Amino acid sequence: MDAANRPVEMIATCSPDGTLLPARFRLEGEEGERLTVRIRKIRHSEEISYRGIEAFRFDCLALMGGRLRLFELRYTVRSHRWVFWRFLDGDGG
């Protein structure tokens, strides 16, 4: 799966202190099927600014295609949009 900057439907939680945490998401597969992915662990998160756009970056682990994958999700503050940014484990698909 080519995951570069793909929009996703996200279910996330927000703690009382304002911490945003992705829980599971749905995206469209290569053949048009809808895939649901449950996030098992958030390994790292940080607030970032790229090209002047405020966003949050999450490095996550989830079971995808029968194996545990490491990937990056981003949430853009102004547009309230989630994207599957890229795989981080060296195997993009």
Image (cartoon, rainbow, N blue to C red):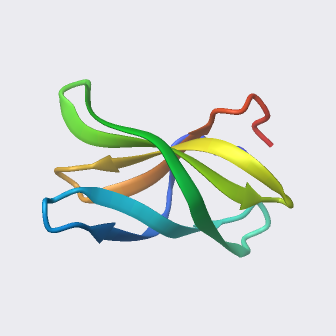
Q: Residue at x 45, y 52 (%)?
A: 83
Q: Residue at x 76, y 51 (%)?
A: 68
Residue 76 is situated, as x and y percent measured from the top left of the image, at 28, 48
Residue 33 is situated, as x and y percent measured from the top left of the image, at 73, 74
Please indicate whether residue 69 sits to the left or right of residue 76 in the image: right
Residue 17 is situated, as x and y percent measured from the top left of the image, at 13, 60
Vertical side of 69 occupied by 90: above or below? above
Find residue 70 and report its image quarter.
top right
The count of marks equals 0
Looking at the image, which residue sits at the far top? 51
Q: Residue at x 25, y 24 (%)?
A: 51
Q: Nearer the viewer, residue 36 or 27?
A: 36
Looking at the image, which residue sits at the far left? 17
Please indicate whether residue 58 sits to the left or right of residue 88 in the image: left
Residue 56 is situated, as x and y percent measured from the top left of the image, at 30, 43
Q: Nearer the viewer, residue 20 or 53?
A: 20
> Which image quarter holds the C terminus?
top right
Vertical side of 39 occupied by 34: above or below? below
Looking at the image, which residue sits at the far right? 66
